[in-house]
């Protein structure tokens, strides 16, 4: 019988090696736009890499509804009040992020089964409610979009070190 040949792409990382490589990567990417950092766990669980960003909520039904919730003005308001409100909204918009935004947090953690680094994604609307699967898909690159119908590319999982729900890109992808 032929012996199975080990793939160089699927070797298992030890927790110590993942930590060493993760800290080195965080030091290299600290100045990147996402600001990657290494996060240690308080107990014996391995740490993870973390990056955060705010992105436009492209075609997000939830955000569009939330943005329109207070946007209707009474018909009997005079034009001066409408201009004053528009000026106030414009001033606030320059000082605060757009209301049609998603906050994304990316983690790279060691997958407990495969022993491989795994990209985990958390996403929130401005009202702090979690993004749904379709909304997370909207922020993935075209390379992933080609596999949108596959249940094995983006899945909802429990974070391996923080134990709360998030989305994961399967480590084989």
Image: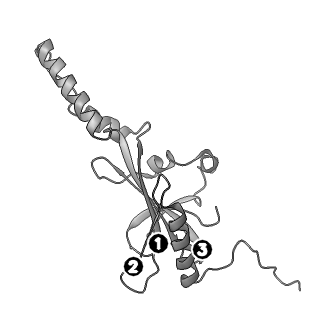
Judging by the rendered image, the residue that carries numbered circle 2 is 41
Q: Is 105 placed above or below 164 here?
A: above
Q: Which residue shows up at 60% across the image and 67% down it?
A: 171
Image quadrant of residue 13? bottom right
Image quadrant of residue 68? top left
* Dot 1 and dot 2 residues touching (CB under 8 Å): yes
Q: Which residue shows up at 32% across the image and 41% down it?
A: 97
Circle 3 — which element?
loop
Q: What whole-number distance in Å separates the C-alpha atoms at marks 2 and 3?
A: 18 Å
Q: Which residue shows up at 39% across the image and 79% down it?
A: 41
Circle 2 — which element?
loop
Answer few, some or many: residues within 10 Å of disc 2's Cα (few below 14, many 20 plus, some between 14 and 19): few
The x and y percentages for residue 33 are 47, 51
Judging by the rendered image, the residue that carries numbered circle 3 is 116
Q: Does the rendering let one see residue 110? A: no
Judging by the rendered image, the residue that carries numbered circle 1 is 48
Q: What whole-number distance in Å separates the C-alpha atoms at marks 1 and 3?
A: 12 Å
Q: What whole-number distance in Å separates the C-alpha atoms at marks 1 and 2?
A: 8 Å
* Dot 2 and dot 3 residues touching (CB under 8 Å): no
The x and y percentages for residue 96 are 28, 40
Mark 1 or mark 2: whose residue is earlier in sequence:
2
Q: Nearer the viewer, residue 50 or 141?
A: 50
Q: Nearer the viewer, mark 1 or mark 3?
A: 1
The x and y percentages for residue 39 are 42, 72
Q: Does the rendering let one see residue 156? A: yes
Q: What colour scheme does the image use?
A: one colour
Q: Is 150 placed above or below 138 here?
A: below
């Amino acid at each position: 019988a032929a012996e199975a040949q080990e793939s160089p792409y699927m070797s298992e990382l030890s927790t110590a090696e993942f930590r060493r490589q993760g800290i080195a990567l965080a030091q290299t990417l600290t100045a990147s736009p996402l600001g990657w950092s290494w996060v240690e766990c308080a107990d014996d669980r391995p740490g993870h890499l973390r990056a955060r960003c705010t992105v436009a909520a492209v075609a997000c039904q939830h955000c569009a509804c939330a943005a329109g919730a207070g946007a209707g003005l009474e018909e009997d308001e005079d034009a001066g009040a409408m201009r004053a409100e528009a000026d106030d909204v414009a001033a606030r918009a320059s000082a605060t992020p757009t209301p049609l935004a998603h906050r994304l947090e990316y983690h790279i953690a060691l997958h407990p089964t495969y022993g491989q680094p795994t990209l985990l994604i958390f996403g929130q609307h401005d009202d702090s409610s979690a993004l749904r699967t379709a909304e997370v898909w909207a922020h993935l690159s075209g390379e992933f979009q080609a596999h949108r119908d596959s249940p094995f590319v983006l899945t909802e999982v429990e974070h391996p070190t923080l134990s709360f729900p998030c989305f994961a890109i399967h480590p084989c992808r």
